[in-house]
Image: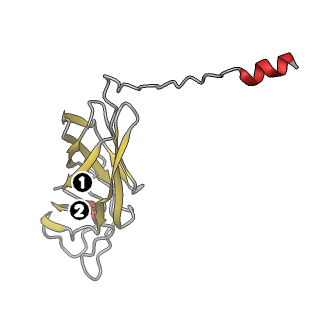
Amino acid sequence: NAVIKTLRSAVFFAAVVTIVLFPSTKAMAQAPVIEAIVPDMGHQGETGLDVAIYGDLFQDGASVFFENPGITVSGPVVWIDPTELQLTIDIDISAPLGPGDVFVINPDFLQGALVDGFTVIEPEAPVPLDVTPNQAYTGDTDVDVVITGTLLYTVIDVDFGPGVTAVMEPNPTNERID
């Protein structure tokens, strides 16, 4: 009984511990933000299209990816400053038409996206500027004709009229002739 009496009369103290968290002196890393892409569209088959991406929090060494599988970055992504990246892209002639998301991934693996940031549109019509030679005579065979102009990379067939058969050969040194 003496033990029970002692326990009943004992006073228990509870300690309250307060934990204070101080903010870190290091800033939390933030994902890049894409605000605009200029130009924000390109034609199927277009190559060497220079693009600028504007936004914030871009890091030197950032990568750029396009949701559209027909768009490839064809050169280095150049970091101008935290608000601008410059790059060159190629758009495959069979790239799906329509808008697609664009992604910037910083070297710290944080990424930002611009939803529907770049749109693939149909190619413009080719414009022949010169045909050399510009004439041939009845009975001539195997006449090599060179056509120069703009957007000729979109041409899949040439028609010189009735009685003339044209065989197109790719130009191995210039896929695109402007």
Label 2 is placed on what type of residue?
Answer: Leu
- The 10 Å Cα crowd at callout 2, few under 14, some 14 to 19, many 20 or more, is some
Look at 59% across and 24% down and name the residue there: 14
Q: Residue furthest right?
A: 1
5 vs 45, left or right, is right
Look at 41% across and 25% down and name the residue there: 20
Where disc 2 sits, the SS reads helix
Please say if 134 is above or below 17. below
Please say if 22 is above or below 69. above
**Residue 64 location in percent, x, y?**
33, 43
Tell me the residue that label 1 is attached to: 176
The reply to whether dot 1 and dot 2 touch (C-beta < 8 Å) is: yes
Label 1 and label 2: CA atoms lie apart by 7 Å
Look at 35% across and 67% down and name the residue there: 97
Please say if 149 is above or below 10. below
Pick the front one: 163 or 130: 130
Tell me the residue that label 2 is attached to: 152
Label 1 is placed on what type of residue?
Answer: Arg
Residue 142 occupies quadrant: bottom left
The answer to whether any part of residue 142 appears in the image is: no
Look at 28% across and 71% down and name the residue there: 158
129 vs 99, left or right, is left
